[in-house]
Image (cartoon, rainbow, N blue to C red):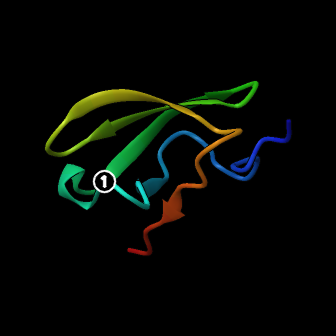
Amino acid sequence: MDDLNPFLEPGMYVRHPTERDWGVGQVQSSIKGKVTVNFEETGKVVIDGTRISLEIVSN
């Protein structure tokens, strides 16, 4: 399976496409398809980048 988020780097801001109540999150790491994001309302979550394409948030 392909990584749907190969462009994400630590420090970037993203949203989860189906979990809007999590708020904006900051990418902590992206390694081999696993993206760790610290969301405003949910805290730290590890996303399977082969199943979920995160949305980049512009500043």
Residue at left offset 22%, top offset 49%:
22
Q: Nearer the viewer, residue 17 or 28?
A: 17
User: Residue beneath label 1, please?
Assistant: 19
**Left or right: 37 in relation to 42:** right
Which of the 4 image quadrants contains residue 57?
A: bottom left
- The relative height of residue 31 versus residue 59 in the rendered view (above or below) is above
Q: Nearer the viewer, residue 52 or 58?
A: 52
In percent of width and height, residue 17 lies at 43, 61
Q: Where is the C terminus found, in terms of image quarters?
A: bottom left
**Left or right: 6 in relation to 41:** right
Q: Secondary structure at mark 1?
A: loop
Instruction: Identify which amino acid the numbered label 1 is placed on.
Output: Glu
- The relative height of residue 45 versus residue 15 in the rendered view (above or below) is above
In percent of width and height, residue 40 lies at 18, 45
Which of the 4 image quadrants contains residue 34?
A: top right
Q: Nearer the viewer, residue 26 or 51?
A: 51
Residue found at the far bottom of this picture: 58
- The relative height of residue 57 versus residue 14 in the rendered view (above or below) is below
Q: How many marks?
A: 1
Mark 1, residues whose alpha carbon is within 10 Å: few (<14), some, or many (≥20)? few
Residue at left offset 76%, top offset 24%:
32
Q: Where is the N terminus found, in terms of image quarters?
A: top right
In percent of width and height, residue 23 lies at 22, 56
Residue at left offset 76%, top offset 47%:
6
Which of the 4 image quadrants contains residue 43?
A: top left
